[in-house]
Amino acid sequence: MVTIQKYVRAQSLEEAYTLNQNKKNRIIGGMLWTRLGRGSVGTAIDLCDLGLDRIEETEEEFSIGAMVTLRDIEVHEGLNAYAGHAVADAVKDIVGVQFRNMATVGGSIWGRFGFSDVLTVFLALDSYVELYRGGIVPLEEFANMKPDRDILVRLIVKKTPCRIIYSSVRNQRTDFPVLSCAVSHMNGEYRASIGARPGRAVLLRRESADDFPEFAAENVPVGGNMRGSAAYRTHLIKVLTERSLQGLRGE
Amino acid sequence: MEHKEYKSINKSVRKKDSMQLLLGKPVYTDDVSPKDALIVKILRSPHANAIVEEINTDIAKKVPGVVAVYTWEDVPKTRFAIAGQTFPEPSPYDRLILDRHVRFAGDAVAIVAAETEKAAVKAMNLIKVKYQVLEAVLDFRTAKDNPVLVHPEDDWFPPCEVGGDPKRNMVASADETHGDVEGILSECDIVLERTYHTKAYNQAMMEPFTAYAEFDRYGRLHLISSTQIVFHTRRILSRALGIPKSKIRVEKPRIGGGFGAKQTAVCDVYPAFVAMKTGRPAQIIYTREESQIAGSPRHEMEITVRMGAMNDGTIRVMDLYTLSNTGAYGEHGPTTVGLSGHKAIPLYTGSLEAFRFHYDVVYTNHQAAGAYRGYGATQGIFAVESIVNELAEKIGMDASVIRDRNMLKEGMVMPAYYNEIANSCALDRCMEHCRQLFNWEERSKVRDMGNGKVRTAGVAMAMQGSCISNIDVGSATLKLSEDGTYNLIIGAADMGTGCDTILAQMAAELMDCDVDDIAVFGADTDVSPYDSGSYASSTTYITGQAVVKACNELKKNICAIASEMLGCAEEEVEFAGTCVRHPGTGQTVSLTDIAYKAQVGNTIAAESTATHSSPVSPPPYMVGMVEIELDKLTGEVKVLDYTAVVDCGIPINPALARIQTEGGIVQGIGHTLMENVTYDGRGKPMESSFMQYKLPTRLDVGNLTVEFEHTYEPTGPFGAKSIGEIVINTPAPAIAHAIRRATGVWHRTLPITPENIAMSVSED
Amino acid sequence: MEIKLKLNGRNITASVESDTVLLDFLREKGCLSVKRGCDTSNCGLCTVLMDGKPVLSCSALAVRADGHEIYTLEGLQEEASDFVGFIADQGADQCGFCNPGFVMNTIALLRENPDPTDDEIRAFLAGNLCRCSGYDGQLRGIRNYLNSKKG
């Protein structure tokens, strides 16, 4: 397990940001991933006192604090009413309720993990992240940014009218996905977010649904790991995208 | 079949420790160990095969809190085996506490003892080791006669002759034939030959390997261990440490699961060695990673079956060859392999005219295998039951009907099972019962559910044993207390299965009292009468019979004491539960009075110890049917329903027998669909945590239905046979069968993952 | 560093290192019902309630408990006793090592959803592994308890 010299509950984002400029220090989320590392952390910076554990819903958007847990977004009525239960579908198979009570949205998004169901589902929505220094950045852009010393403050999901379906294939029900897939229809455009390739999720856009499954299978880069080969993943991209599009059409 | 009305037998009594366990009381090794013990950690080899050329512990020893660091130079030079088996063990003596030659990625290189875990871990990281990395044997198919030897040492020692030869990487080998195999094969209408491959699954019991050692008030080594085998562990420690058995006491508290893993003394020698060297209490708790990579998992096997049959479905001949991978050390290697034939071939005794069973067990540079529920039978039954399903399909016969035609039936002699007679066998009734209960006729049809989904079913049968015949020994001591209650003391190990309770039910039945009136204690080498331990499905059958004997002897003693009190002959009185009665005079003496009398001027023991062993090992039988829904596009398999009917003789405790069955089925589902064991190119295990080794969750299992067909086993206590192991044997062949029916593809390697299914092309 | 928390209803102050996990801290404090079954947050054996929510104490830093309320099974004996007998009647306790975590999460489930369906029970308890029972006996026990409450 990772060793930690010091633990600080930051009293302001500025304090957290300043501490985080030291490369030995680290912002901690749910500690679920950080803990597994073998290295040493100078100061563990906890954002838990900064009121970032709330989901705020307005007419235009959901503002999801970095310390909101996966369980919070799983059971949030407004968010799931808006996203047709896709957010709950995306997180409900992540390990267990106890794990989801700890894992944070901020940690999941910031980590830009390849296996992330969370990144996959929000990429298919009209999502942005608010960075303390970097300001508001579209999630798609953030997903491709190199990790730096900034702080992810919140995730913003605009209530752009949208239909979305989430699906994944897992070798065991609470395992990491072999492939995750969120397909949405928004602003006259189809989006397919494909995660666990096994690399981090990528987003494809297409005006027509017609050849989208084939297009996605051809254009999403995939690899092989313990959970599945590249060829199987390409096969699943086509299957899941096609089924999701059928679902959006109400078939 | 004998039908009797019992008071305590065949009753679903709560386990004696249930409420303690469910309310989280401190009853396990780590809970009962003093907190000031030294923490023992093992530095493990990153290489699959290497020689420790240099090892420098100077810096590590300077870490504050570190008390000692030991290397191969510090340990005794006597080789030993850690398999929990009756002496002389079939497993070769091929281990040292620390060996200069490390033989798998995870093998022990150094022992660190420190005041805190943090200090121990820090010290481990500061030990400098220079390895001479050797080429490793990583594919068990290439192990035999490979120029790379896993055990080149000259002091390798086999306590039994089992056909091993370390200069050929062989642990055991044998070849047995009954009848004219080749002649009958040439007469058959159809001969199939298929090869099946199963993996080195981890038991993954929830409590990792754990042991604590200290010197007691007599200056003897006292080990508290999460073990199934207290007496074997004492013997193993005695040899490994070079101290007499009278100086060692081994005790088990409650055990957090075993499934055979703890039939091997995986971790016990380390804290014992540290306690001996330092004179201080020492404790080791394996991490989950250590339990995964340096435990005692199942033997990986590749089994080739040739089966000859007639077009009418008569199975006439079977030739089964098993190649078993024992890994880096030989624990249980020579014995597990035997069950792959002896517990699979006899299922078809009904029609089989000839069989051949031959095998090789080889060393590789993988983690050493050990004992896991099923113990080779699981692997053999996957092969035999699968090829029978293939055969049924080839000749166009229903898979359950082909079994009706060929299966073993009650009263038959089993040539492939040491010529034992099936005195109690309801395999035929299990099949019929399961067929009805499951509605096989309808649910075995392939049904298209739309959107790529298909439903269908598969079937398999199984057998196991109820002990190791002529070897296993069980004993029980029953003592009368002053208030007429009893103490039952055993050396068998309840690892959660409920044997403490089951044995108490037997004692209560015979002593005509409540189960609550029997206090059970086990197991402790200083206190318990000798018992081989809880393995080989033997506790109910063997130790149970010892309990029966002990009760009958104690009743005699009680009557003798009472007759002295009544001033009559012993033969004139009879035991009547709460009292002893003289039917002639109507006089009675209460059990309480007898117990008090036993403490005053008495020379007749108010206790009895009895021992049992059996010349036979009557098999339990089982039929399993599974309904799945398979997604042909993604390859996902949902187990909708698993129905099983079991013949375990008379179930002593039906609730516990049912849970055993359900638990075994779910482990079998895990092995078939999601649990895998793989190594990277350099011999490093990949599934080294629960993040990568995926046990079934409650979402991965459908409905389970379990029912029993009673038989009365004449050699078992109250007609009972075993249940603990057989229950893991049917899922793999039954699910593989269902997958074939859904997809047109036979999968002969486990696990069968969604990718294997989706990416396979139908053979049809 | 020093932390103040409420453990099983009692206010306590303790000194812990920054990287001590809650599990080790709780066992140190005598809450031996809290078990470690894995090192990767996968098994659920270490489940405790933090401010009423089930969490994995193997993964939570003890310092994070500062200012919060923690319950282990030691502090919820009565609430657990209401239903665990039904699981015992099924024989589903088996080896027992997963029981405390499973019982704690069942308490959390029943507080949140006093009348769950079988599927809701399975979903809520999915993070509690059990290698012995095959899960069905645990489910039957909970179901029998719920039925008994309805009379």
Image (cartoon, rainbow, N blue to C red):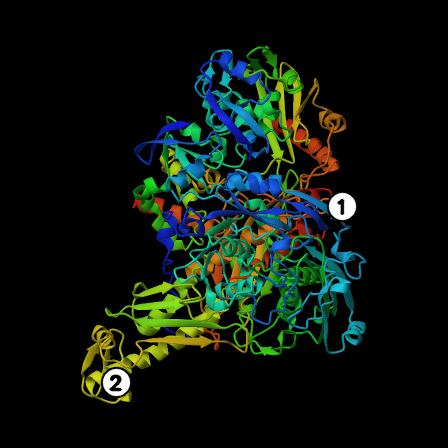
Q: Is B631 positioned to the left or the right of C120 in the image?
A: right
Q: Nearer the viewer, residue C54 or B84?
A: B84
State which chain disc 2 sits on: B
Tag in front: 2 or 1: 2
Q: Is residue A249 visible?
A: no
Q: Secondary structure at mark 2?
A: loop
Q: CA distance from mark 2 to mark 1?
A: 77 Å
Q: Which residue is mark 1?
A: B761
Q: Is B329 positioned to the left or the right of C28 in the image?
A: right
Q: Secondary structure at mark 1?
A: loop
Q: Position of residue B221 (x, y in %)?
A: 46, 60
State which chain disc 1 sits on: B
Numbered circles on residues, count: 2
Q: Position of residue B558 (x, y in %)?
A: 28, 79
The numbered mark, 2 or 1, whose residue comes first in the sequence reads 2
Question: For the residue marked with disc 1, what is the amino acid?
Answer: Val
Q: Nearer the viewer, residue B729 or B763?
A: B729
Q: Are marks 2 and 1 on the same chain?
A: yes
**Residue plotted at (64% across, 37% down):** B451
**Residue plotted at (36% across, 68% down):** B488
Q: Position of residue C24 (x, y in %)?
A: 44, 39
Q: Position of residue A202 (x, y in %)?
A: 68, 23
Res. B554 image quadrant:
bottom left
Question: For the residue marked with disc 2, what is the amino acid?
Answer: Val
Q: Nearer the viewer, residue B234 or A84?
A: B234
Res. B183 image quadrant:
bottom right
Note whether B255 is above or below A32 in the view shown.
Answer: below
- Count neighbours of disc 1 (C-alpha within 10 A) and say few if under 14, some if 14 to 19, many if 20 or more: few
Q: Which residue is mark 2?
A: B573
Note whether B126 is above or below C86 in the view shown.
Answer: above
